[in-house]
Image (cartoon, rainbow, N blue to C red):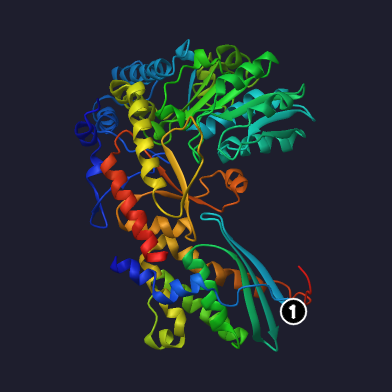
Amino acid sequence: MSDLRELYQEVILDHNKNPRNFGKLENHSHHANGHNPLCGDKLELFIEVVDDVIKDIAFTGSGCAISTSSASIMTQFLKGKTLSDTRHFFNDFHDLVTGIPISEEQIDDMGKLAVFAGVQEFPARVKCASLSWHTLMNALDSEIETAQTED
Amino acid sequence: MFDLKKIRSDFPILDVDIHGKPLIYVDNAASTQKPQSVIDSISGLYSESYANIHRGVHHLSQKSTALYEGARKTVGNFINAGDSKEIVFVRGATEGINLVASSFLEPILEQGDEIVLSEMEHHSNIIPWQLLAERQGAKLSILPILDSGELDLSKLDSLLGPKVKLVAITHMSNALGTINDVGEVIEKAHARDIPVLIDGAQSIAHIPIDVQALDCDFFVFSGHKVYGPTGIGVLHAKAQHLQSMRPYQGGGDMIVSVSFEKTEYNEIPYKFEAGTPNIAGAIGLAAALDYVSELGIVEIDHYERDLLAYATEQFNRIDGLEIIGQAKNKGSVISFTLAGIHPHDVGTIMDMDGVAVRTGHHCSQPVMDHYKIPATTRVSLSFYNTEAEIDQIVISIENVKELLG
């Protein structure tokens, strides 16, 4: 059970039950769908970028506790971050969940994202934790869309 | 009555510990574990009898050929084929279906024609037909399922129109456990001269198969789901079809004579077995079928149905657990959802208790769509599973609820 508690930390369980920033953003500049066909997780991400800063970010979808909480914590964490910082955190998060060593300073900078360190003991779940982040990168790398007022 | 202790001791992997807990292997619909006799047959072949087949005059080649062709007879007997030349060795059920799509259906499928499938098919009995239909401008017609998980056979007559060139349907659903009344489907299709393929990937390990009584045109299954090795499977087809079908792949062993002007193909089934086949796989499969026959497929069926009934009763007591697929005639599969908990989390937590379950859409996304769920957790039982294991699984599910509920 101890490994499981490492994976399913209270913070993760809380965000799974009550995901933050859950819903659609009517005024978004970036948008992408994420899908993990292995487990059927589906995620839709909306981002409003103003002057290279993530002003607002939200998601909808359905997935397992790891993917839902990861999306929730990611959106909370990235609000107000610059795009270059965001790409930086994508790399650090990737290293964290795949077990690539990162410095304590990097972990400190990651704040609440660090609760996903336990995922590295569960290789089958890495995709769950990183789905929202890959969707984020797809959204940011796609052409900047004009802000949409409807779906 | 089954000697469970003896049976379990035949499967060395059942002694393995997972995360410090005894393995409870209930992912049998994905693949079954192998008895020692299968493992021994393969290592015995390679250490004592192996050479290439159908070619050499030397002793070992003849010995291997006899074992390989003996395996074909064993398969033929297991499914009561009229003649072992109707048995084509393939890589698995998937390749068997692709072979029929390419060699049987493609030459006769025309624009506007139809292929009838059911809503509960595994992707392997959808995609080969879909690819072919796209190429030829044909379409798929889908026999729907009822919420019970049974086929809505009342819709069958209206689907079997004049444009239908084939019906391809599963004998037993891997996602729901439903055992279909394929006899009725075959009878109705044959009344309109429509040939029928039966996907026996699941049924082969659980219920007696008699392809002559079924009168199906094609029957496919995979060795690894019936206690045999991976990479070997079987296509059974009526001899008249195999005779008229064009070859699937070209290569050695499938010819009588070759020149650059003309090649004369070998007789059936060799016409469909190009290249050196999976010799050890076929021999391992025969050992697996011998093992199953020794236990008795009728006895296996009885034991597994009792175990399924016990598991269903225990699972139904779990608050928030819903069993997906409640057909009256069911093989030993329980697909379920837990209220508010995603199957992927269920699978991870149960794994830590040593319980191997499958989670996901089970390569049957149309079934998931029917029930409007992304995935289920699936417990699929074999004759080596026990009531005591079911009790442990129930405890494990309660652990999941405690952690995530």
Tell me the residue at 22%/44% (across/down): B15
- Residue B194 in percent (x, y) is at 68, 19
Tell me the residue at 52%/54% (across/down): A38
- Residue type of the residue flagged with mark 1: Asn
Q: Is residue B405 above or below residue B114?
A: below
Depth check: give the residue in front, B393 or B363.
Answer: B393
Tell me the residue at 51%/77% (across/down): A73
Tell me the residue at 40%/15% (across/down): B77
Residue A81, by quadrant, is bottom right
Residue A123, by quadrant, is bottom left
Q: Quadrant of the C terminus of chain A?
A: bottom right
Left or right: A68 in relation to A55 = left
- Residue B20 in percent (x, y) is at 23, 57
Q: Secondary structure at mark 1?
A: loop
Left or right: B38 in relation to B180 = left
Kindly identify which residue carries mark 1: A27
Q: Quadrant of the N terminus of chain A?
A: bottom left
Residue B227 is at least partly visible in this image:
no
Depth check: give the residue in front, B378 or A51.
Answer: B378
Residue B326 is at least partly visible in this image:
yes
- Residue A57 in percent (x, y) is at 63, 79
Residue B110, by quadrant, is top right
Q: Is residue B162 above or below residue B4?
A: above
- Residue B324 in percent (x, y) is at 51, 44
Q: Counting other residues with Cα less than 10 Å from the Cα at mark 1, is it few (<14), some (14-19), or many (20 or more)? A: some
Q: Is residue B50 above or below residue A83?
A: above
